[in-house]
């Protein structure tokens, strides 16, 4: 079972930047993908960015050009650099690790980190 710990959230003004970290309890080199999601209240969770086991990345259209996902295999950590943040992006940001198992692809979640963007 993969354990994930997010960090780096906080309060930032509109237009500001934050870098979130998602650290895994095991090597991310063998993890299929790590995704960053955000969720506001009871609304549906939104996929923000994803990075595969190689260098494949994916971004939601709303964050392209402002967010960047990267990873450090030596530190078992995936980063989400968020620039030019907007008030509507206030949310809890969570990472998910998707790993192959004998039962298929398993998803593991961190506890989330709060990002608040003030106007």
Image (spheres, helix red, strand yellow):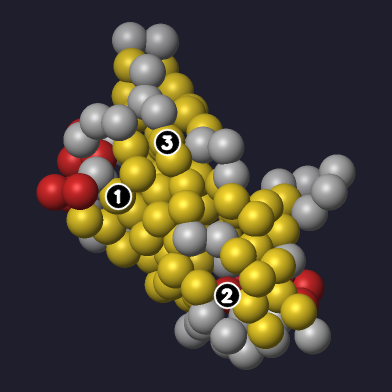
Q: Quadrant of residue 23?
A: top left
Q: CA distance from mark 3 to mark 1?
A: 9 Å
Q: CA distance from mark 2 to mark 3?
A: 23 Å
Quarter that holds the N terminus: top left
Q: Marks 1 and 3: in contact by CB < 8 Å?
A: no
| Residue at x 31% of width, y 63% of height | 70
Q: Quadrant of residue 88?
A: bottom right
The crowd level at tag 2 (other Cα within 10 Å; few <14, some 14-19, many 20+) is: some
Residue 6: x and y, percent? Answer: 47, 47
Residue 116: x and y, percent? Answer: 70, 67
Residue ID for mark 3: 4
Helix, strand, or loop for circle 1? strand
- Residue 63: assigned label: 2
| Residue at x 56% of width, y 61% of height | 9
Please report whichever mark, 2 or 1, sits nearer to the chain's N-terminal start.
2
Please report whichever mark, 3 or 1, sits nearer to the chain's N-terminal start.
3
Residue 65: x and y, percent? Answer: 49, 84
Left or right: where does residue 71 sit relative to residue 61?
left
Question: In terms of depth relative to the viewer, which is nearer, 40 or 62?
Answer: 40
| Residue at x 44% of width, y 23% of height | 106
**Looking at the image, is 61 positioned above or below residue 91?**
below
Helix, strand, or loop for circle 3? strand
Q: CA distance from mark 2 to mark 1?
A: 21 Å
- Residue 77: assigned label: 1
Please report whichever mark, 2 or 3, sits nearer to the chain's N-terminal start.
3
| Residue at x 50% of width, y 73% of height | 18
The crowd level at tag 3 (other Cα within 10 Å; few <14, some 14-19, many 20+) is: many
């Amino acid at each position: 079972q993969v354990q994930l710990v997010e960090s780096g959230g906080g309060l930032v003004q509109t237009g500001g930047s934050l870098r979130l970290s998602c650290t895994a309890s095991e090597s991310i080199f063998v993890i299929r993908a790590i995704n960053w999601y955000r969720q506001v209240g009871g609304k549906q969770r939104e996929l923000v960015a994803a990075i595969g086991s190689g260098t494949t990345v994916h971004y939601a259209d709303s964050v392209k050009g402002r967010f960047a996902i990267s990873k450090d295999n030596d530190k078992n950590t995936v980063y989400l650099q968020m620039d030019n943040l907007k008030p509507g992006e206030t949310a809890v940001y969570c990472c998910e690790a998707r790993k192959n198992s004998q039962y298929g692809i398993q998803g593991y979640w961190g506890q989330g980190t709060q990002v608040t963007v003030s106007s």
